[in-house]
DNA sequence: GTCCGGTGTGAAAGCGCTCTCACGACCGGC
DNA sequence: GCCGGTCGTGAGAGCGCTTTCACACCGGAC
């Protein structure tokens, strides 16, 4: 009577060794692709492995190698809805593609709320994974600090708000926002409003800073009436736009800090009887799928998301290999001009 | 010089034992909450654990316990966009909630494309997880069969198409569709069309079957002109609806196999100048968030998704505990009547 | 013939943990 | 005062693997 009734347990190295007529060490060498094995021995082992349907026990292996060959993408967010963000889906896709011809496995960890964050932190501290890519959106999130302390290879997606020295990859949010605003200025617009993102998120903060910097450089004084804050959702964008129109009906352009919000803004503008870009020019951010299909198609700022993801993967794997230098990388954005501005 | 330069390795049981002045066995007992330890010994150990910041090594532990205390939610789908499905987000949320006060950890595994599916299969077969909840949408997906063979505790989300005997939980798609169609009949509608889902997905098949069953029971002969197939997206629903209107302009109701498609259908109907529910009554499926906010609000079929998720968790954990009986559970749906029908 | 370096192999140690088993201490009952 | 029965504890085996180390073997240089 074994512990787990009915569950067939996989054969061990020893059994394979016996069947192949070699030692455990040789089997191990074959399984791990060591070159120092005679071809005939190798064949015998391979045959035995196939016959017994041998699969190495990862627990035993990582007990000695100190590696798990697994990295985690952890998503720290109070709201599971973030999954719905196509942004996230793209990161997952690119990440698993980058890992496809590696030994590395990818697991996703969702940490919403304090309890789950603790659970994830414990999971990582225990050494279940060799490294983690952390997507943490809000400034009050404690997970980045906890994981940074855990001595585990770590790459952040997005610049950390507290300026701690960790490895991260981010888009040049400020630069992109500035370029977007400059594009509006170049189009002759002068009353340029903004729907900015939440100011406890780095993307919200940086994009707003870029907008202000562009205006300042053009010698235009900031006007609080021209600033409304949204929550990166379409509904939030629509509301913020309505607020702006109420406060400053004479605006001729608006920089919206995300495409979903921009779509909402377009709706509000349409409902108010204004034409885009005739009366009001609109620029979004992210180059999300909706940007191309909205009415009118959205001029927006594209982030090199795939490149950023590959970069994160790269930085992380290098850390896992023992290359310990901490790097920060900021990737340039690109203005995609469509019909809305 | 240790293997992984710079990475501080966690203390071991032995070091804790030495500091606490007890044996390794006693430390293990304390860490695992065994009652057979004298209070003073327990305190000494706890103190030592805290002082050394001891965390048990899961590889060593699972090498002997044969457990990993981790279950996987695997998402087998060619398209990572599925993440965007709020459906999925709800399952993740409920699942981690159910596991919150358990020892169990949850990891998500994305398997799109053949290579990744193989990788996931290997991951599971190696025994990285104690069990898996598998969401596989399409009939040609081989992962369900592979995992079923892997002898690992398994619960499927959704009835398997090939009728194999595995544990699964599903909503009563056929029953729900039938009830929806009967609701249309009860409202006096007689030319009842349907926008069905992909016929290689169990939800698509069953919902279509329910629609047909209701018509048949009412003595209405099936009419191929009244059937169009969508892909569960809003755009697909809009296209399918347009097709239906072209083929049968006289329809007075439509059962749409998902809410996003229903929203698309509403748009097409509006554009064709028809009123809902005046000219055409519409019933959707899923009770997604959009159903309540669409114009008009959608009458739809709600699945007890949270309950289903808890049920899956439950069935899986029971299997993990060694309770091996294979069960299938089909949960009743509920018609939510709003304005559209 | 001896010596050499290289090459493939096996014995064995040990990774950090759990858990059985044996043992001593202590209790109450006779 | 002796015996059976807890109860807490520690010694030690062993989980399945990697990896070091020593060794046997071989062909070529001298």
Image (tube, coloured by chain):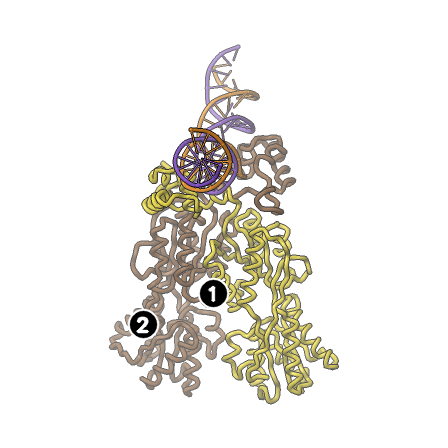
Chain colours: A brown, B yellow, C purple, D orange
Between disc 2 and disc 1, the foreground one is: 1
Residue A34: horizontal and vertical position, in percent?
Answer: 52, 36
Closer to the camera in the image, A267 or B31: B31
Between discs 2 and 1, the one toward the N terminus: 1
Closer to the camera in the image, A260 or D21: D21
B75 displayed left or right of A171? right
Taking A313 as reference, is B243 above or below it?
below
- Callouts 2 and 1 close, C-beta under 8 Å: no
Same chain, labels 2 and 1: yes
B270 displayed left or right of A221? right
Dot 1 crowding, Cα within 10 Å, few <14, some 14–19, many 20+: many
Q: Quadrant of the N terminus of chain A?
A: top right
Query: On what subunit does the disc labeled 1 rest?
Result: A
Residue A23: horizontal and vertical position, in percent?
Answer: 57, 31
Q: CA distance from mark 2 to mark 1?
A: 28 Å
Q: Quadrant of the C terminus of chain A?
A: bottom left
A329 displayed left or right of A69? left
Residue at point 32%, 76% (across, down): A185
Q: Quadrant of residue D21?
A: top left
Query: On what subunit does the disc labeled 2 rest?
Result: A
Taking D11 as reference, is B128 above or below it?
below
Residue at point 39%, 46% (across, down): B55
Label 2 sits on a secondary structure element that is helix
Disc 1 designates what residue? A83
Q: Which mark is residue A211?
A: 2
């Amino acid at each position: 009577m074994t512990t787990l009734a009915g569950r067939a347990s996989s054969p061990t190295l020893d059994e394979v060794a016996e069947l192949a007529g070699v030692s455990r060490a040789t089997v191990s060498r074959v399984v791990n692709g060591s070159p120092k094995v005679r071809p005939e021995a190798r064949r015998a082992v391979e045959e035995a492995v196939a016959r017994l349907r041998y699969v190495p026990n990862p627990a035993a292996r990582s007990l000695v190698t100190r590696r798990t060959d697994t990295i985690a993408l952890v998503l720290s967010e109070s709201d599971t809805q973030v999954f719905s963000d196509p942004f996230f889906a793209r990161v997952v896709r690119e990440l698993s593609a980058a890992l496809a011809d590696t030994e590395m496995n990818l697991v996703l960890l969702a940490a919403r709320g304090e309890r789950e964050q603790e659970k994830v932190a414990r999971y990582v501290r225990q050494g279940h994974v060799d490294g983690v890519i952390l997507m943490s959106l809000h400034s009050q999130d404690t997970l980045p600090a906890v994981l940074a302390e855990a001595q585990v290879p770590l790459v952040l997606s997005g610049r950390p708000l507290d300026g701690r020295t960790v490895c991260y990859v981010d888009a040049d949010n400020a630069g992109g926002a500035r370029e977007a605003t400059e594009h509006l200025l170049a189009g002759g617009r002068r009353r340029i409003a903004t729907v900015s993102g939440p100011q406890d998120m780095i993307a919200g903060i940086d994009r707003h800073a870029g907008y202000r910097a562009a205006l300042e450089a053009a010698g235009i004084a900031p006007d609080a009436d021209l600033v409304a804050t949204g929550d990166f959702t379409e509904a939030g964008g629509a509301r913020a736009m309505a607020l702006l129109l109420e406060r400053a009906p004479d605006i001729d352009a608006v920089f919206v800090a995300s495409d979903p919000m921009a779509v909402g803004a377009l709706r509000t503008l349409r409902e108010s009887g204004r034409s885009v870009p005739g009366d009001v020019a609109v620029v979004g951010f992210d180059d999300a799928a909706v940007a191309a299909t909205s009415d009118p198609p959205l001029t927006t700022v594209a982030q090199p998301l795939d490149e950023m993801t590959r970069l994160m993967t790269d930085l992380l794997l290098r850390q896992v290999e023992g290359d310990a230098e901490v790097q920060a990388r900021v990737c340039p954005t690109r203005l995609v001009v469509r019909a809305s501005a």
